[in-house]
Image (cartoon, grey):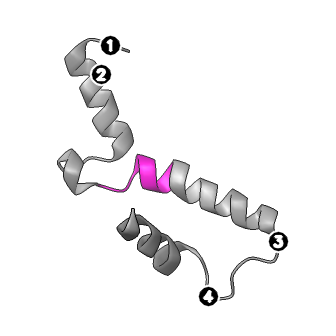
């Protein structure tokens, strides 16, 4: 989790922050649910994103 928050702060959130709480919530949600979960390769998943690792697991286990 610490690495994820570091990446969020250094790679996603601008140094000036957000003008409103709503804008921050939308942008950070986009980062977490979109970019981080769908595209970011994770070492624990063998270099797969969490979404791809879950799809692979479901295919192997026969669940959907």
Farthest-out residue, front: 2
Marks 1 & 2, CB-CB < 8 Å contact: yes
Which one is earlier in the sequence, the residue at label 3 or at label 4? 4
Residue range (magenta): 34-41
Distance Cα–Cα, label 2 vs label 3: 39 Å
The residue tagged 1 is 63
- Dot 3: few (<14), some (14–19), or many (≥20) neighbours within 10 Å? few
The residue tagged 3 is 20
The residue tagged 4 is 15
Quick one: SS at disc 1?
loop
Which one is earlier in the sequence, the residue at label 2 or at label 4? 4
Which one is earlier in the sequence, the residue at label 3 or at label 1? 3
**Residue at x-position 52% and y-position 55%:** 32
Which one is earlier in the sequence, the residue at label 1 or at label 2? 2
Quick one: SS at disc 3?
loop
Which one is earlier in the sequence, the residue at label 2 or at label 3? 3
């Amino acid at each position: 989790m610490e690495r994820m928050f570091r990446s969020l702060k250094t790679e996603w959130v601008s140094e000036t922050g957000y003008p409103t709480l709503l804008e921050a919530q939308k942008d950070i949600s986009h980062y977490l649910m979109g970019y981080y979960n769908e595209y970011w390769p994770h070492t624990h998943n063998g270099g797969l994103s969490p979404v791809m690792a879950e799809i692979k697991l479901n295919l192997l286990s026969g669940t959907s």
